[in-house]
Amino acid sequence: MTIRDTLECVARAISVRLDDEADRALRLLEQAGLSRSDAIRTSLVEAAARRRTLEAVRAEAAALEADAADRTEMVAVAELMEALRAPR
């Protein structure tokens, strides 16, 4: 009897063309000790995480801007801060 296991987590190879800036960045990461593949994988994951964070901040800012009560409170706080500011 033959026992076989199938691995379903197989890496997918891709091909990219790097411009000068990307090539310099890749070389910098490689000099820091990362393999080429690790440098590219890490960079992609980190870039996606930054984009998700930026989109979340934009969505939160839009929600705050759309909240009339919050806008009223922001104006009141700004006016209070201005009133507390020391005269020049």
Image (tube, helix red, strand yellow):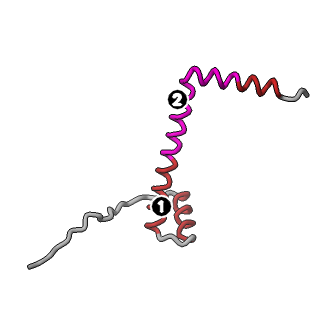
Q: Is residue 61 magenta?
A: yes
Q: Determine whether label 2 and label 1 are within 8 Å by CB.
A: no
- x, y percent for residue 34: 51, 70
Q: Residue at x 45, y 66 (%)?
A: 38
- 81 vs 23, left or right, is right
Q: Earlier in the sequence, mark 2 or mark 1?
A: 1
Q: What secondary structure is the magenta-colored segment mainly?
A: helix
Per the image, the residue denoted by label 2 is: 63
Quarter holding residue 11:
bottom left
**Amino acid marked by disc 1:** Thr
From the viewer's side, name the closer residue of 26 and 83.
83
The CA span between labels 2 and 1 is 32 Å
Q: Which labelled disc corresponds to residue 42?
A: 1
Outermost residue, left side = 1
Please report the bounds of the magenta region as a residue range. Answer: 51-76
Q: Are there few (<14), some (14-19), or many (20+) residues within 10 Å of tag 1?
A: some
The picture places residue 56, in percent across and down from the top left corner, at 50, 40
Q: Position of residue 24 (x, y in %)?
A: 56, 62
Residue in the picture at 64% in, 20% down: 72
Q: In the image, is residue 8 part of the stretch drawn in magenta?
A: no
Q: Quadrant of the C terminus?
A: top right
Q: Nearer the viewer, residue 52 or 70?
A: 70
